[in-house]
Amino acid sequence: MKHLTTLATLLAGVAFAGAATACETTFRSSDTHPEGYPTVAAVEYMGKLLEERTDGRLCIEVYHSAQLGEEKDSIEQTQFGVIDMNRVSLGPFNNIIEETQVPSLPYIFRSVDHMHTVMDGDIGQQILDAFTPHDLIGLAFYDGGSRSFYNSQKPIKTMADLEGMKFRVMQSDLFVDMVSAVGANATPMPYGEVYSSIQTGVIDGAENNWPSYDSSGHFEVAKYYTLDQHLIVPEVLVMSKVTWDGLSAEDQAAVRQAARDSVPEMRRLWAEQEAQSEAKLEAAGVEVITDIDKTPFIEAMEPVYAKYVTSDVLKDLVARIQATE
Ligand code: BDP
């Protein structure tokens, strides 16, 4: 008898747990980074909020480590509605959505705080709204720290040291021109190909933030890291418009709110990870070059601004960002 009661309780427990976790809809969300990376953890956190707030109806499953493809391809799949959500850098959108070029301009932000103020306000909203005509719904911006050059050859202390070197950039014309502007050559390629390309000498290096430099293992094959901090490019969380259009207005609001509420958590995780990665890689023997004069780098970017900031919309966005305290 006692045994039976225990079994009944157990079965009831299983049934209950089953009901609580039976999601009516599970959004598939793509991320290039591995499990535990701040962007992956933040979208999982958003999923938890959404599940709680919809009584388990709406859930998110994050397919990390580029399981759903490299960013450029996964963006297309998201536009088609094959993938429901995607967390990506703004870089791969540059060639499709003009407005995303503005926060991707080198040295446009004076600091991460400046970037937060801009992206949390009207300018950020305008850029999120610019995704809609491209079959995507911009939900929130995440942090991507600042990006700097690393390479396998030598410590780079001045712009002259970059002369003729070959760096991988994200698949964005703007970044190709950014690298040319400092006297080096750019090769756009998917993130997943960078490690072996450095290892085999196809390229001399790449550019990224501390957490990516760490989690990608690029530091193992390119140990010179020059903190010129040319980009403070935010990352973005988008939903496919196909998925979005299938949701009720209340569920759309719940998705938007959960995405917004994941931002402070993301920033907390990001700050933690940045410090951890920096300490880990310094201990691992990465040579960090910090005594660098950024002025020539900033001045060298003038032709990039001249080439890309040509439409009224972009000119206005740049002027408003520069005027933001
Ligand atoms: C990382 C971004 C990721 C990009 C990657 C890259 O988080 O979205 O794919 O850089 O350089 O920092 O491709």
Image (cartoon, rainbow, N blue to C red):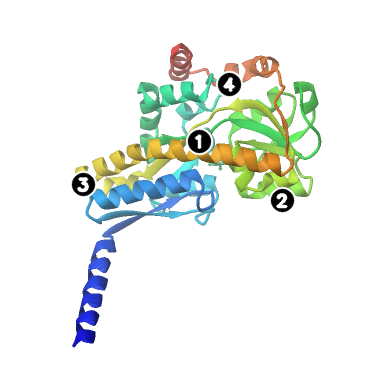
First of labels 4, 3 by sequence position: 4
Nearest the viewer among 96 and 146 is: 146
The reply to whether callout 3 and callout 1 are in contact (CB within 8 Å) is no
Q: CA distance from mark 4 to mark 1?
A: 20 Å
Q: CA distance from mark 3 to mark 1?
A: 35 Å
Residue under numbered circle 1:
271
Q: Residues within 10 Å of mark 1 (few under 14, many from 20)?
A: some
User: Residue at horizontal 39%, vertical 35%?
Assistant: 264
The reply to whether callout 4 and callout 1 are in contact (CB within 8 Å) is no
Q: Describe residue 42's horizontal placement relative to residue 89 as left or right.
A: left
**Residue 196, labelled with which disc?**
2
Q: Residues within 10 Å of mark 3 (few under 14, many from 20)?
A: few
Please name the amino acid that badge 1 sits on.
Ala
Q: CA distance from mark 2 to mark 3?
A: 45 Å
Q: Describe residue 115's horizontal placement relative to residue 220 as left or right.
A: left
Please name the amino acid that badge 2 sits on.
Ser
Give the SS element for disc 2. Answer: helix
First of labels 2, 3 by sequence position: 2
Residue under numbered circle 4:
107
Image quadrant containing the N terminus: bottom left
Residue 49 showing in the rendered view: yes
Nearest the viewer among 135 and 216 is: 216
Please name the amino acid that badge 3 sits on.
Ser
Residue under numbered circle 3:
248
Given this view, does label 1 or label 2 mark the residue nearer the observer?
1
Q: Residues within 10 Å of mark 2 (few under 14, many from 20)?
A: few
First of labels 1, 2 by sequence position: 2
